[in-house]
Amino acid sequence: MAKAETTADQLISVIIQGIEDVKGKDINILDLRDIENTVCDYFIICEGTSNTQVNAIVNSIQKKVSKTLKDNPWHTEGADNAEWVLIDYVNVVVHVFQKHIREYYDIESLWGDAKTTVIETSY
């Protein structure tokens, strides 16, 4: 019997849990499905306060997705300096920033046509 395909909604939910487990901040989901020529369906953007927290968020996401959904990222980059780490799950791409780098690149403005969902955190 073939393994059931993980839906984007399941993946997003588990990624958000991974971010929240280590208190990642300012979590936004950008739905890119209605925009032409995009590389994926969703961006999830969040931030950590330091290199250490950015790495903790990345590790938390990867462990939680691996354990819960038995899925691994297709590609990860930026972990060396941990200012902006990209985790590519093909249809869902996660961007984990430090605040000053997030403000500098301002991805949310570049993808201004995307439907944005802000995740409210309780911490």
Image (cartoon, helix red, strand yellow):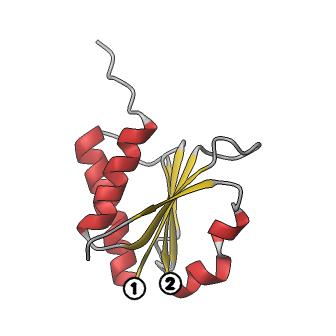
Please state which amino acid type lies under the numbered disc 2.
Lys
Q: Residue at x 63, y 41 (%)?
A: 33
* Element carrying mark 2: helix
Residue 75 showing in the rendered view: yes
- In the rendered image, which residue does mark 1 sit on? 49
Q: CA distance from mark 2 to mark 1?
A: 7 Å
Percent position of residue 64, x then y: 26, 53
Residue density around tag 2, few if under 14, some if 14–19, many if 20 or more, within 10 Å: some
Residue 57 in the figure: left or right of residue 99: left
Quadrant in the picture for the N terminus:
top left
Is tag 2's residue or tag 1's residue first in the polypeptide sequence?
A: 1
Percent position of residue 121, x then y: 32, 69
Percent position of residue 27, x then y: 43, 67
Quadrant in the picture for the C terminus:
bottom left
Q: Residue at x 24, y 43 (%)?
A: 68
Q: Residue at x 34, y 48 (%)?
A: 13
- In the rendered image, which residue does mark 2 sit on? 99
Residue 52 in the figure: left or right of residue 38: left
Percent position of residue 70, x then y: 29, 39
> Tag count in the figure?
2
Q: Do the residues under discs 2 and 1 have CB atoms within 8 angstroms?
A: yes
Please state which amino acid type lies under the numbered disc 1.
Thr
